[in-house]
């Protein structure tokens, strides 16, 4: 029966969605969007109408959070009556208009493909042979948003089961295909500006103290006593030229467990060496457009800065920014090279502050 078919499609789609890793096919959080979709219906047998492409949906939505959108939809369908048995004539045509509110649970919003689960409630008006009725309707199903280019236009495909509480309860299968267009743009996070730190004056040694790592800073004043030979150091004896980087998966700004271990060590050092400040610069490989890669690099830098802020590092100590695909360190023509270019580089800058 149709109803069991709807439940099966919905259940299989939902299980596939839950298998995706949460990771931009969907609109950014805080963006509004409009959508337009064509509708194919496999109707309940009791409707006595033909299946086929019968109308469409126009709607408005808003991205509430990383995983949830809300929508308001208007749907218009024209259903052709079936031919009856020989000599019995045909069943009447039906015209429907519906207004519904939907909640979408989106996965992998920042990826090229963003699957989702949708559920909604509304009212449907059905006109048959000059008479009409208003009924409650509910719908649920699964779909996927596919980014076409940039982050503004997406292809939207979905399969929904619809229940209409008419005189005889009716269950239809709807397939909707169309486009979603983001409105305006969400402002990128403002990079924190690192305040220059004036190096503390070093008191003169009382009498020929040792300089065990030969960096020019005597041991009593050296806060980094094992600086590698030849490194440029600050008055505190800590290396000025130290850089560190973390890597990212393709088209992702999510930190890996290994990255978090590395950043925990960075946070511990920054907590101890409160005079250190620097930059956090995100980079990408050459996959995708320059505009999209610029935003992705900014999100990667902000992921690192936000993680360190969560470990107690003050916002003003690290300036987060993105360089897009403009500064590769390896060949983007190879998978290994592209992997090296998907990075965030942390670099100390307070040594260059005016003395």
Image (cartoon, helix red, strand yellow):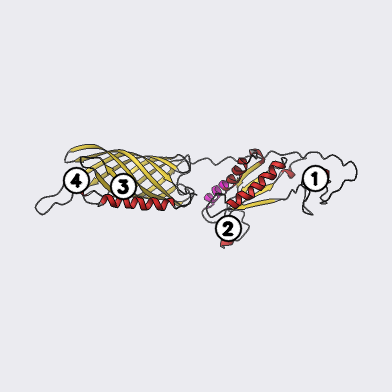
Name the mark nearer the viewer: 1 or 4.
1
Q: Does the magenta run of residues contain 281?
A: no
Question: Could you give the CA–CA distance between mark 3 and mark 4, rounded to whole angstroms?
Answer: 21 Å
Q: Would you name the residue on which mark 2 appears? A: 339
Q: Which residue is mark 1?
A: 222
Q: Percent x, y for residue 323?
A: 60, 49
- Residue found at x 37% / y 45%: 118
Q: State if disc 2 and disc 4 touch (CB < 8 Å).
A: no
First of labels 1, 3 by sequence position:
3
Q: Report the Cα–Cα distance between label 1 and label 3.
A: 70 Å
Distance CA(mark 1)–CA(mark 2): 37 Å
- Residue 246 horizontal/vertical position (percent): 62, 52
Q: Residue furthest right?
A: 207
Q: Secondary structure at mark 4?
A: loop
Q: What secondary structure characterizes most of the magenta part?
A: helix
Q: Position of residue 155 (x, y in %)?
A: 40, 50
Report helix, strand or loop for mark 2. Answer: helix
What residue does disc 3 label? 161
Q: Nearer the viewer, mark 4 or mark 2?
A: 2
**Is 295 inside the magenta-drawn segment?**
yes
Residue 120 placement (x, y as % from top left): 35, 41
Mark 2 neighbour density, 10 Å: few (under 14) some (14–19) many (20 or more)? some
Pointer 1 or 4: first along the chain = 4
Judged left or right of residue 27, residue 202 is right
Q: Which residue is mark 4?
A: 93
Element class at badge 3: strand
Q: Would residue 52 be seen by someone viewing this image from the given angle?
A: no
Labels 2 and 3: the sequence-earlier one:
3
- Which of labels 2 and 3 is toward the front? 3
Magenta span of residues? 288-299
Note whether 322 is above or below 329 in the view shown: above
Disc 3 + disc 4, Cβ < 8 Å: no
């Amino acid at each position: 029966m149709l109803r069991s078919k709807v439940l099966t499609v919905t259940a299989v789609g939902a299980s596939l969605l839950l298998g995706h890793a949460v990771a931009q096919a969907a609109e950014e959080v805080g963006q509004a969007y409009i959508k337009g979709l064509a509708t194919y219906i496999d109707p309940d047998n009791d409707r006595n109408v033909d299946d086929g492409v019968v109308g469409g949906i126009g709607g408005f939505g808003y991205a509430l959070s990383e995983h949830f959108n809300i929508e308001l939809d208007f749907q218009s369908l024209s259903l052709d009556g079936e031919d009856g048995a020989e000599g019995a004539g045909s069943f009447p045509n039906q015209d429907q208009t519906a207004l519904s509110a939907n909640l979408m649970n989106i996965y992998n919003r920042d990826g090229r493909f963003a699957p989702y689960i949708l559920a909604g409630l509304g009212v449907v008006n059905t006109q048959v042979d000059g008479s009409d009725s208003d009924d409650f309707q509910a719908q649920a199903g699964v779909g996927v948003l596919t980014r076409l280019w940039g982050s503004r236009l997406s292809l939207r495909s979905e399969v929904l089961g619809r229940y209409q509480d008419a005189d005889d309860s009716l269950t239809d299968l709807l397939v909707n295909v169309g486009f979603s267009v983001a409105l305006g743009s969400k402002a990128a996070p403002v990079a924190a500006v690192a305040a220059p730190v004036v190096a503390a004056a070093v008191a003169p040694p009382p009498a020929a103290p040792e300089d065990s790592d030969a960096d020019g800073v005597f041991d009593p004043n050296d806060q980094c006593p094992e600086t590698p030979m030849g490194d440029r150091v600050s008055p505190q004896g800590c290396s000025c030229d130290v850089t560190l980087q973390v890597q990212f998966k393709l088209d992702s700004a999510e930190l890996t467990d290994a990255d978090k271990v590395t950043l925990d060590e960075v946070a511990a050092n920054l907590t101890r060496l409160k005079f250190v400040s620097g930059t956090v610069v995100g980079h990408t490989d050459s996959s995708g457009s320059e505009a999209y890669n610029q935003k992705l690099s900014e999100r990667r830098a902000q992921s690192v800065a936000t993680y360190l802020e969560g470990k107690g590092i003050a916002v003003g100590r690290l300036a987060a920014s993105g360089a897009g695909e403009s500064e590769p360190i390896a060949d983007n023509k190879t998978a290994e090279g592209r992997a090296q270019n998907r990075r965030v580089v942390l670099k100390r800058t307070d040594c260059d502050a005016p003395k």
